[in-house]
Image (tube, rainbow, N blue to C red):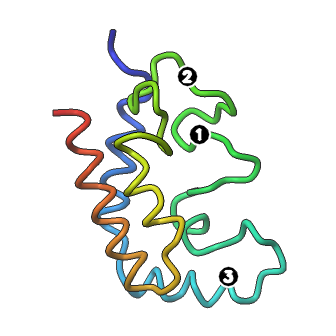
């Protein structure tokens, strides 16, 4: 069965690969001014960690049956490490590195 939202998945990979360190620095500055806990640089740049928790590929709050990430979804199993790197990035350089690692991992899921 072909996974849902493959087009959006590939677009997200490209976005992760194209984000510049300057964009991330700017988003970090904006997030410092926010009073909302879920407003962070990663959310600003890619929708990562949307509130409430919804898939940035399909908008669903429940895991899709045809999710490209498989039964673990984007946050568990083999997908957890790179997800956590983005979630826990506390400097622009760490987020930049986390995005690149996530894109590299995502590419392995569609080969």
| Cα distance in 3D space between marks 2 and 1 | 9 Å
Which circle marks residue 55 in the picture? 1
Query: Dot 3 surroundings within 10 Å: few (below 14), some, or many (20 or more)?
Result: some
Q: Which mark is residue 64?
A: 2
User: Which SS class for mark 1?
Assistant: loop
Q: Secondary structure at mark 3?
A: helix
Label 3 or label 1, whichever comes before in sequence order: 3
Q: Position of residue 96 (x, y in %)?
A: 36, 76
Please state which of residues 72 and 105 is positioned toward the viewer in this rendering: 72
Asked where in the image residue 32 lies, by quadrant, the reply is bottom right
The tag earlier along the polypeptide, 2 or 3, is: 3
Q: Left or right: where does residue 87 sit relative to residue 51?
A: left
Q: Earlier in the sequence, mark 2 or mark 1?
A: 1
Numbered label attached to residue 101:
none
Q: Residue at x 32, y 51 (%)?
A: 13
| Contact flag, marks 2 and 1 (Cβ < 8 Å) | yes
Q: Which residue is mark 3?
A: 31
Instruction: Specify few, some or many for label 1: CA neighbours under 10 Å numbering under 14, 14-19, or 20 or more.
Output: many
Q: Position of residue 76 (x, y in %)?
A: 47, 42
Q: CA distance from mark 3 to mark 1?
A: 21 Å
Q: Position of residue 111 (x, y in %)?
A: 15, 33
- Tell me the SS state at disc 2: loop
Q: Is residue 78 above or below residue 104?
A: above
Marks 2 and 3 sit apart, C-alpha to C-alpha, by: 30 Å
| Quadrant holding the N terminus | top left
User: Percent x, y for residue 62?
Assistant: 66, 28
In the foreground, 12 or 78: 78
């Amino acid at each position: 069965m072909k996974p849902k939202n493959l087009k959006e998945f590939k677009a997200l990979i490209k976005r992760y690969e194209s984000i510049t360190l300057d964009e991330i620095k700017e988003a970090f500055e904006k997030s410092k001014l926010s009073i909302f806990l879920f407003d962070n640089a990663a959310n600003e740049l890619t929708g990562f960690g949307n509130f409430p928790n919804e898939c940035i590929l399909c908008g669903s709050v429940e895991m899709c049956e045809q999710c490209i990430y498989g039964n673990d979804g984007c946050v568990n199993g083999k997908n957890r490490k790179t997800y956590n790197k983005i979630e826990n990035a506390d400097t622009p350089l760490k987020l930049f590195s986390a995005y690149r690692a996530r894109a590299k991992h995502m590419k392995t899921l569609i080969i």
